[in-house]
Amino acid sequence: MNIDTVCNQLREMRFTHMAQQLQDRLANGDHRDLSHEQFIALLVEDEYLHRRQKRLDRLVNRAGFKPEQPAMENITYSGSRGLVKKDFIQFTTPKWITNAHNIIFTGPTGCGKSFLAQAIALQGCRMGFTSRYIRYTMLFEEINAARGTGQYLKFLKKISATKILAIDDFVMQEISEQDISSLMDIIEEKQQTGSIIITTQYPIAKWHHRMPDPTIADAICDRLVANAYKFNLKGDGGSMRNKN
């Protein structure tokens, strides 16, 4: 059996990248100083890393991050801003996600809340978890669109299946009673299935007054805050958007 036949069989089994790597490595002479076992292991590693990168690319593309894709390794830590590195190490491992803990970032505009939320959600993607980043107002636009097409339950199921939901600019706009009921549905669905990251300029104590139904507001605040890591960020006289 010749190499062309082997490569065709690999492609037929959907090992396209391995087939290409086999041809390239043979052409470059990579096999000459390796045993058969080592060369096979190298090809398997090529295919494994390629598939892992493809999955990461899919997760990131579906997450809705901003084009610059903030990452945890690019966070500028500063005690004066309320950012201490030791507090963020825990988000590089999956424990906080598997335990369905939330994260809340409060602070003035430009202090880096959105950057941090996306960086942590991207780290989740790197660990193999699905993530979604969405602005508060856009969330309700999607909800209302789903209701209008009779796809609301399907939308809830999709949100529930997403392990990390990052909601940016939380309670920045007032919402209707129907919208707050939908928000409650989402938070209820997510409570046991994954984590929610919240960014907002409003302190937690003021959330309640930004929602139209006090009873539902109580339930939402309780579910979001009870098991959350809370960070109250401070500005330092300039926008962190440019610095990061």
Image (spheres, grey):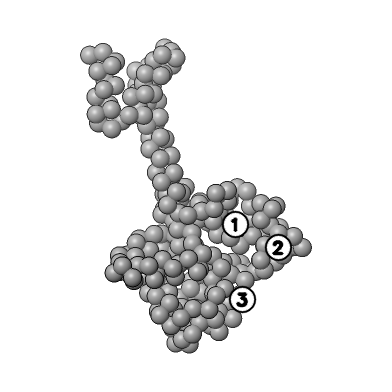
Q: Secondary structure at mark 2?
A: helix
Q: Earlier in the sequence, mark 2 or mark 3?
A: 2
Instruction: State the mark number for residue 203.
Output: 3
The answer to which image quadrant residue 169 occupies is bottom right
The answer to which image quadrant residue 104 occupies is bottom right
Instruction: Inspect the image, locate mark 1, and give the three-letter code of the amino acid beneath it.
Output: Phe
Q: CA distance from mark 1 to mark 2?
A: 14 Å
Instruction: State the mark number for residue 25.
Output: none
Question: Badge 3: few (under 14), some or many (20 or more) residues near its Cα, within 10 Å?
Answer: few
**Residue highlighted by disc 1:** 115
**Looking at the picture, does residue 101 appear above or below residue 72?**
below
Instruction: Inspect the image, locate mark 3, and give the three-letter code of the amino acid beneath it.
Output: Pro
Q: Earlier in the sequence, mark 3 or mark 1?
A: 1
Q: Secondary structure at mark 3?
A: loop
**Residue highlighted by disc 2:** 81
**Looking at the picture, does residue 72 appear above or below residue 47?**
below
**Looking at the picture, does residue 155 appear above or below residue 13?**
below
Q: CA distance from mark 3 to mark 1?
A: 18 Å
